[in-house]
């Protein structure tokens, strides 16, 4: 986790973004979702989220006065910063929930911070459904035939159909955008030029043989 975190932060400071959306940063102060040397921001978010509880517990177990300045504390703060750079709302929500649970069980003094993390998680949850209008209007949004996943369910279905046409060897690396543009319906709604699923992208690009 430390290697992934610090190596990607170095790339960000250098203005290098090698994954999907490469070139959007325009330097350390630029805009765009950061994926570092991984395939997309969500993949980086998943890795950070998986290691976050362990790193946080290690920091909490540090009895030094300035625990957040220790190696474990700096790692936790760096992981949170990197998660913010990925723009992964689900990852931030997961960090907020996991962090709140750890802090709540750690000590009574930390429960106020845990409460703040729960509030942060609630805000992230509301932002997660912002494209659907609001959580209150979610049922109405579904009845209108819209996709609450911002087009992901459509593109996943399209990706499975594309994969079935060439399951063994796939279509080659870097063909996702061209395949989506060529085969999606004219009136479809989809954000980005990829399948928003690392496993599906791997199968479509390399086929089952390449994936194995």
Image (spheres, rainbow, N blue to C red):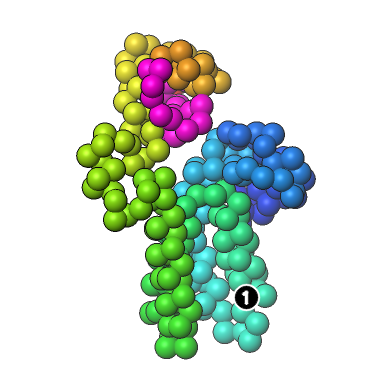
Q: Quadrant of the N terminus?
A: bottom right
Quarter-of-image position of residue 40: top right
Of 153 and 206, the residue lying toward us? 153
Position of 31 compared to 191: left or right?
A: right
Disc 1 residue crowd, few under 14, some 14–19, many 20+, Cα 10 Å: some
In the rendered image, the quadrant that contains the C terminus is top left
The answer to whether residue 128 of the structure is visible from this angle is yes
Which residue is under mark 1?
68
Q: Is residue 7 visible?
A: no
At x 47%, y 88%, the residue is: 109
Q: How many labels does the image show?
A: 1
Residue at screen point 55% across, 35% down = 39
Up the image or down, 163 lies above or below 191; here it is: above
Residues 47 and 40: in front is 40
Determine the image quadrant of residue 65. Answer: bottom right
Residue 90 percent location from the top left of the image: 43, 52
- Segment tinted magenta in the rendering: 185-209
Report the residue at 45% width, 20% height from top: 180
* Residue 193 sits inside the magenta stretch: yes
Q: Is mark 1 on a helix, strand or loop?
A: helix
Residue 200 placement (x, y as % from top left): 40, 28
The residue located at (33%, 33%) in the rendering is 153
Q: Magenta includes 29?
A: no
Horizontal side, residue 91 vs residue 12: left or right: left
Task: Residue 34 in the image: state x and y as whole percent.
Answer: 61, 44
Residue 99 percent coordinates (x, y): 45, 69
148 versus 169 height, above or below: below
């Amino acid at each position: 986790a430390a290697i992934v975190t610090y190596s990607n932060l170095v790339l960000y400071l250098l203005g290098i973004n090698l994954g999907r959306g490469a070139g959007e940063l325009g330097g350390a102060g630029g805009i765009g979702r950061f994926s570092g040397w991984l395939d997309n921001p969500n993949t980086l978010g998943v890795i950070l989220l998986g290691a976050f509880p362990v790193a946080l517990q290690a920091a909490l177990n540090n009895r030094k006065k300035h625990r957040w300045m220790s190696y474990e504390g700096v790692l936790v703060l760096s992981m949170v910063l990197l998660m913010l750079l990925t723009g992964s709302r689900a990852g931030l929500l997961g960090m907020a929930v996991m962090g709140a649970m750890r802090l709540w069980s750690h000590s009574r003094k930390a429960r106020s911070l845990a409460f703040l993390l729960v509030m942060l998680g609630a805000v992230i949850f509301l932002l997660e459904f912002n494209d659907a209008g609001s959580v209150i209007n979610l049922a109405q949004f579904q009845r209108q035939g819209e996709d609450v996943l911002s087009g992901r369910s459509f593109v996943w279905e399209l990706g499975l159909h594309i994969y079935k046409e060439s399951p063994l060897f796939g279509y080659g690396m870097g063909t996702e955008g061209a395949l989506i543009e060529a085969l999606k319906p004219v009136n479809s709604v989809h954000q980005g030029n990829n399948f928003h699923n690392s496993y599906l992208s791997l199968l479509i690009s390399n086929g089952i043989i390449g994936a194995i």
